[in-house]
Amino acid sequence: MERLAGTFSASYGDLSRVYADLFASPEFAASAEQKTKTPLEFVLSALRAVGASYDGSKPLAKVLEQMGQPLYQAEAPTGYREVASAWVNAGGLVARLNFALSLAENSLEGVHFEQASLLGDLEGAPADWLDRLAMRVLVPPLSESTRRTIVATLAREAETKPPDDGLVLQRQALGLLLGSPEFQRQ
Amino acid sequence: MSSFDRRAWLRLAGIGALGWLAPSLARAETGVRRKPLVVVVQRGALDGLSWVVPHGDDAYYSARPQLAVPAPGRGADACLPLPGGRFGLHPASQPLLALYLEGRLGFVHAVGTPAATRSHFDAQDVLESGTGGASSRDDGFLNRALRSAALHTAAPQAAGTASSAATGSSAATLGAVAIQSRLPRILRGDASALAFEKLTDMRVRGPAAKLVGKTFEEMYAGAVDEALRSSASGAFDADALLGRVRTRAPSPRDGVVYPKSTLGRRMRQIAQLLQADVGVELAVTESGGWDTHVDQNGRLQRGLTDQAQALRAFLDDLGPLAQEVCLVTVTEFGRTVAQNGSGGTDHGHGSVMMVAGGGVRGGAVHSRWDGLERDVLFEQRDLPITIDQRDVFAHVLRQHWGLGDTSLVLPGFAADPLLALG
């Protein structure tokens, strides 16, 4: 803050220089992925991660309400809140998990993504393609424990599903990744 | 009215030295669970003058020539007479009349928040924060009440003890719930409280839901972020408990029929939670549709019918357990005494609260009623507030939960000694 104030004074109030210093600062870099997405950020980033199209149907507004951030209904007088505790609660989290699963299944009304183009080339054992899928949808790297958990689940599912059962495992992996703790980070 | 007269009237109305509620064992002293408190917030400003009708006041009829609920005996839509002669119950609230006559349900009239606002948002903020006015506080007073039990135990308490007690109770039991999609302001704060619209909302759904749910549980158990980790464990614990609720109390008691409405569904689920004995001490929900600027009579006929059926079904469904429960309704403010030009009423000031349950000294309309003549009205137009909502809540928290000191719950508020001591 002091350095930025110094830049501000030295540049006689040139805000573009202040922003340049702010964005180049190590503190700014270190602040990435430290915050939790708001429901709106979570939903939009999930839609973008899978390249979904959306026709503007109401169900997504309903989803946002369940997650605790009803569209255009910020609470007066302070507006939508800036702290994670307002967004991360048991009910809201379950709503996020269910949204992630429905999105991966393409079962949300008005929302559609091309499964074949996102998941079609992921062949073989889940352990072989999970990292590639994670790279496509996540910004932070997949943690080792999340990775291990997903691989174990997919292995159990693979035993019960016939091997040529479409993209079932890939969709399931996608739902788990979008619902993972990593995907909740800003 | 002089204070002496008021005192006499309060006695007459049933607010005496022993209060409205029989005292229950204090959790603070005994460590036992608090008796369930259920609060229904009626959002939109319910017209108290239509719900509990002052049919003894001529001014009511001259201010509302087309909208007033007729006095008892004056036609099919007349109000139902309540003993005492001054007030009547809206005919759509007929299901509540028997409870009133049995003394299990009572009303508080000309009650509200002291803030002079006519904005729904501001008034709900004042009501739910429990501060009596504009406040920078983010938490709700019922959340503070949840934490206050620990503050009154004999041993000195650090702030951390209260919150760890709250976290601990969330793992084993449900504690405080809101049956609506978002946690309402009144219940927000440091003590854990869960909001859900339906008992099934805590479930992970979809193909292979069970396995997927387990997977998420494992993932979040290893999450670095503490808030995410504890929310997730709260969610999975809650789902396990709600699963028990669904199987333990699968259908209403014989003969009990809830209205097929949002409020009916919500009250049914609160009854299910209480019947299943999963530790719910506080349940909050809300109803809407009370902002009757137009077509007030039609809207209230529907709304009050739904409300009376839902609340009656709830208390009937609880059976003997209703003796242990205290049910309170509250709205942010009342409506203008005079009707407007579109068959409705506009934002006003004082309204009505309802208190029901085993410990309630019902069968009375508790009030400091001074009539509806223009010179007694608030700003010469609205029912004045003669009893603060916080007096009612302070009383309920003391008597029902055994809270010795409500100063942390309702900061800066001194409960009316006339109400508490008679």
Image (cartoon, rainbow, N blue to C red):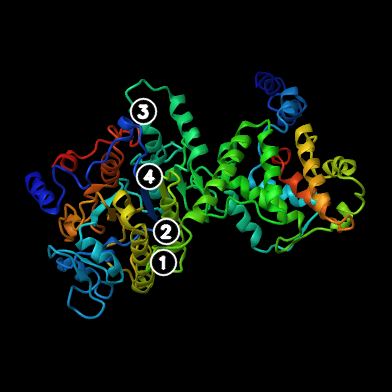
Query: Which is in the foreground here, disc 4 or disc 1?
Result: 1
Instruction: Tell me the residue that label 2 is attached to.
Output: B267
Of all chains, the one bearing label 2 is B
Mark earlier in primary sequence (4, 1): 4
Name the residue that disc number 4 marks.
B126
Residue shown at the point (92%, 47%) measured from the top left: A124
Earlier in the chain: of badge 2 and badge 1, it is: 1
Identify which residue, A108 or B206, lies in the foreground.
Answer: B206
Quarter holding the C terminus of chain B?
top left
Labels 2 and 1 touching (C-beta < 8 A): yes
At which x and y percent is residue A42?
69, 46
Q: Is residue A93 left or right of residue B156?
A: right
| Nearer-the-camera pick, A6 or B115 | B115
Q: How far is mark 3 from mark 4, CA to CA?
A: 24 Å
Q: Are marks 3 and 4 on the same chain?
A: yes
The kind of residue tagged 3 is Leu
Q: Quadrant of residue A88?
A: top right
Q: Residues within 10 Å of mark 4 (few under 14, many from 20)?
A: many
**Gap between marks 3 and 1 measured at Cα:** 39 Å
In the picture, the disc for residue B258 is: 1
